[in-house]
Image (spheres, rainbow, N blue to C red):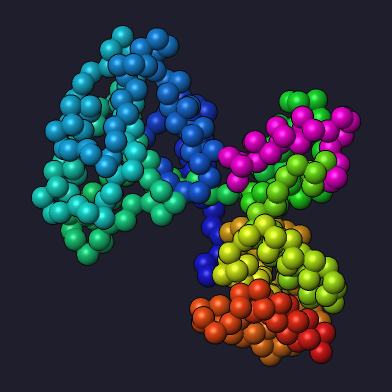
Amino acid sequence: MAKKTENTEYNELRLDLKEGRHKPLYAFYGSERFMLSWALDELRKKIEPGTEEFNDRRLDGKTLTLPDLADAIEMMPVFSDFALVEIADYDFSKLGEETALGLAELLSDIPEYLCVVFILDENGMKLDGRLKCNQKLKKLFTSVLFARQEDAVLRRWIKKHFAARDKYVSDADADYLAYITGGMMTALSGEIEKVAAYSRESEIRRGDIDAVVIPTLEAQTYELTDAILKGNYNLAASKLSVLISMEEAPHRICYGIALTLRQLFSAKAVLTEGKGAAELCGLYERMRDFQARNLISAARGMSLDKARAMCDIAGNAAFKLNSVSYSDKAVLAELIIELSEAANG
């Protein structure tokens, strides 16, 4: 697990857009599609209003040919000082050497009035780095990762969007909303709208959020495992029943529990090194601050061997779920019982 690092390219992009600059060639990728869309919108604003039909050139990467791309790049802006070429879903992993060399030649001389953006999935450019032609091609790009925002940034964003609807939300409840929705702005924007419309008061309360927002599976399995670690077997069993009634796949439930237990093991390992919640949070991109604090607190009361044993119990349950000899519901129920015994034994 790699620690979080500062997203320099993203920060530079935000500064460039704020000051009206742009790089000639970008590869946009990552899970935070809301901010990716925002960046594209900011680039589109550089086009003279009313000329977007000619100067915002959107190409389908799945069917794109080099001649098609050449035509889009070589066409001068029409009644505008700027043009944008957007290519979605281009598969760099399938490039042959001849195509890679041709693409590199085409993209190596982009005029100042043009910006070319490849819009990729969460994993970015999948190039075979062993090929010199691919190395040359990759160096031409400014690759920008759009990842989940840091807690403090996301908290301010949530509060700002509630305020735009004449609603106030506390820091704690803003963090809670971010946590149960997965912390992605695309999902949050819709949930903020729902919660604001539901609440009759000027202040958003936890009850308003719980009334209309369905937590992600990750959030629910975390709360289930947290209940086990705190010795609340009845609450854990209740949360498992809810997940089963929602027809969540047993394998996904088991994976969610196993993930939290791996994080618990990491928490114990962090503690043995004399570190704490901040270092643990840095190991997991999607972990919230309060999750890290809870895991560190739980890890203080158990040995490294016990944390490892609980991971093994979850692994054994996953093995059973792959066997036709076991009932899925029975395996999950047994998992909760065994974890409760291990956590409190």
- Residue 23: quadrant of the picture: top left
The structure residue drawn at horizontal position 80% and vertical position 25%, both measured from the top left corner, is: 166
Residue 226: x percent and y percent? Answer: 77, 69
Residue stretch rendered in magenta on the structure? 184-207
Where is residue 123 drawn, in percent x and y?
Answer: 41, 54
Question: In percent of the image, x 45 and y 20: which residue is there?
Answer: 45
Front in this rendered view, residue 310 or 103: 310
Q: Is residue 183 above or below residue 79?
A: below
Q: Position of residue 297 (x, y in %)?
A: 80, 73
Q: Is residue 170 visible?
A: no
Q: Does residue 39 appear anywhere in the picture?
A: yes
Magenta-drawn stretch contains 203: yes
What is the chief secondary structure element of the magenta stretch? helix
- Residue 329 pos. (x, y %): 66, 74
Q: Quadrant of residue 242?
A: bottom right
Q: Nearer the viewer, residue 15 or 192?
A: 192
Q: Is residue 15 magenta?
A: no
Residue lying at 47% horizontally and 49% vertically, measured from the top left: 30
The image quadrant that residue 70 belongs to is top left
Q: Is residue 146 left or right of residue 154?
A: left
Residue 119 vs 276, above or below: the answer is above
Residue lying at 42% horizontally and 23% vertically, measured from the top left = 44
